[in-house]
Image: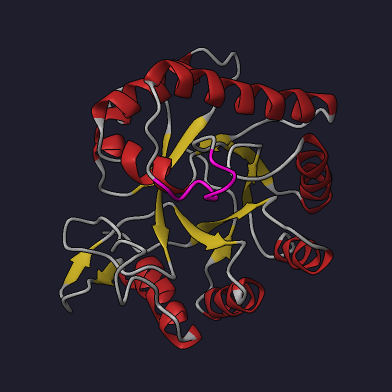
Amino acid sequence: MESKNSIDINADLGEFRNEIQLSNELEILKYISSCSVACGGHIGTNKSVRLILEECRKCGVAIGPHPSYPDREGFGRRKMDISLKDLNKSLRKQIQDFFEIANSLSMPVRHIKLHGTLYNETARQENLINLLLNIVDSIEDKISIIGPTNSLLEKIVSNTNIPFISEAFVDRRYREDYGLVDRSQDGAFLVPLKEQISQARNIVINQIVTTENGQQIDINADTLCIHGDNPNSLKLVKEITDMLKKENIKVQTYSS
């Protein structure tokens, strides 16, 4: 693989529950190039979406909705017994609300990124992939899909006219099949900051990632994800951008 001279860094924001978390999110915006904003499925209100979008505009950060299963109680991280019809209705409502706010601010929407369990399930389930593609196809503006690298979702989207932005995680442990180790399992998260920085460096510069079993696998990512609800997210993104600067790698919005 060719070495990269730039990388997109995205964060999932609009997930704050108090002023301290909000302040943290607003600081993160100073270091990233793309932002996916929670829009009511797992958390978020029209007010919180507008607040984050206004700050994104000030910082020149690309935006997109971050819809999920309608599961505020479980923060969108539980499996849900929901029909495709009801899920379609919920997702379209979340996305429509987001677009209305973005349009009122005259802000272009660059991408869509699903959240939590829906993100992981859509990566590998064809019925959910088709649902997502139908929704994106129905949007008048051309937007990209952010999803996990080397996934079934990437394979199928790559055969459509919809741009795909492949994503990698700096704080999660990978399996050999490029899936993430389940959150319920020990070792699912890279906890020490230095391990997260090391994984970010390997993904961007060496284009490899070390799996849960110690195997190194090739990985090609267009964007790195920073979880806004990670208590160390601000320190993490600062150190990642410092590391990239030393390597002469720019942080900039990915153009598919």
Q: Is 109 located above or below residue 161 in the figure?
A: below
Left or right, 177 with reference to 123: left
Q: Residue 70: percent from the left, percent from the top? A: 54, 35
Q: Is 103 located above or below residue 13 in the figure?
A: above
How many numbered marks, from 0 up?
Answer: 0
Q: Residue at coordinates 22% horizontally, 73% vertically from top-left? A: 212
Q: Residue at coordinates 62% horizontally, 38% vertically from top-left? A: 64
- Quadrant for the N terminus, please: bottom left
Using the rendered view, name the quadrant where residue 210 is placed: bottom left
Q: Residue 214: percent from the left, percent from the top? A: 18, 79
Left or right, 229 with reference to 183: right
Q: Residue at coordinates 40% horizontally, 27% vertically from top-left? A: 82
Colouring convention used in this rendered image of the protein: secondary structure
Which SS type dominates the magenta stretch?
Answer: loop
In magenta stretch: residue 72: yes
Q: Which residues are magenta?
A: 71-78
Q: Residue at coordinates 61% horizontally, 63% vertically from top-left? A: 229
Left or right, 202 with reference to 35: left
In magenta stretch: residue 236: no
Camera-side residue: 217 or 136? 136
Q: Is 198 located above or below residue 146 in the figure?
A: below
Q: Residue 176: percent from the left, percent from the top? A: 16, 62
Q: Residue 105: percent from the left, percent from the top? A: 84, 30
Residue 161 visible in image: no
